[in-house]
Image (cartoon, grey):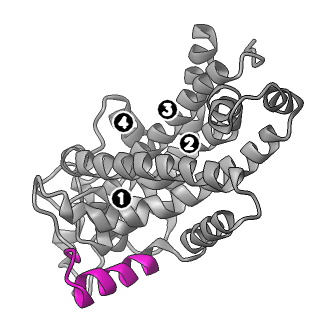
Amino acid sequence: MLGYALKRVLSAIPIALITITVCFFILRMAPGGPFDGERALPPDVLKNLRAYYNLDQPLIVQYFIYIGGVLRGDFGPSMVMTDFSVGRLLAIGLPFTLMLGFTAFIVGTLAGMLAGAIAAVNQNKWPDYLLVFVVLIGLVIPNFLMANIVQLVFGVYLHWLPVGGYVPGSAIHLVLPVLILALPHGGRVARLVRGSMIEVLGTNYVRTARSKGLGTRLILARHAIKPALLPVVSYLGPGLSYLLTGSLVVEQVFSLPGVGKYFITAALNRDYGLVLGTTILYVFIILALNLLVDLLYAWLDPKVRYR
């Protein structure tokens, strides 16, 4: 297992390098730049700014300068928020983004597993139809549209919950953002659990357990839950990465102090350093989560052998 994990870590290095390279050249080759605005800067000022950020160098030289900084853990300065480095901005916003994403992940995963199990046990009955309907709503409606709907209903009309902003330590400000992030994630988990558990409940060893007089709860706990979770485990890594990246839009809609605020502002203003820094951060998060999921999958399924 340790050897497999080491191989996965080594194989992730070229993936990360390719991603950084592609993003770097796409940003640099796109029209416009971080200093292009409605009012043009004086030529001398623009020249000095380009020299300060190495933008006057050939593109390949800029690339190697940036890669060298990344290898040292330096993502460079922000070209729009001049008082902050990219690393500093990520350090400010990342804890909140991780907290929001992991909270939605736990809520969505647990709710999805429970809903999927209930739907599977009551297949083709009214609880199954009701849960499938709720799941479809969460999957079909985009999170930014659903965010506006819940803001309007629970914040403007009912005055139950705040429509945006965040007060440190206030859980009530997180209810709507967590709900919006957890709904589609929980829907996907519920669909996977439902389909997998229906298949498991139809296997011969479950029929044998029923013929011996075991109750439904005992069958689920001892024989059905663990094999039914295998497809869910495969999804959890990409699902968590989806929540963390999807939280960028939700943070902007709810005016939350996470990485999303900086990333969207940087994308609109062509802040090369901050866009690349955020991209690199999420690439490493996705690679780490995929490795964790593979190791967990091997623990759940003893038949899996890594060579």
Give the residue type at disc 4: Val
State the separation of the CA atoms marked 1 and 2.
31 Å
Does 36 appear above or below 215? below
Going from the N terminus, do you reach mark 4 or mark 2 first?
4
Going from the N terminus, do you reach mark 4 or mark 1 first?
4
Question: Which residue is outermost to the front?
Answer: 213
Residue at the (54%, 77%) spot, across then down: 141
State the separation of the CA atoms marked 4 and 1.
14 Å
Give the residue type at disc 1: Tyr
Indicate left or right for 135 with 216 as reference: left
SS state under label 3: helix
Q: Which numbered tag is attached to residue 288?
A: 3
Check the picture and name the quadrant holding the N terminus.
top right
Residue at the (57%, 9%) spot, across then down: 2
Residue at the (57%, 46%) spot, across then down: 238
SS state under label 2: helix
SS state under label 4: helix
Magenta stretch in the rendered image: 145-163
Q: Quadrant of residue 80?
A: bottom left
Residue at the (63%, 72%) spot, across then down: 133
Q: Which numbered tag is attached to residue 258?
A: none
Question: Label 1 belongs to which residue?
Answer: 272
Q: Which numbered tag is attached to residue 236?
A: 2
Q: Is residue 130 magenta?
A: no
State the separation of the CA atoms marked 2 and 3.
12 Å
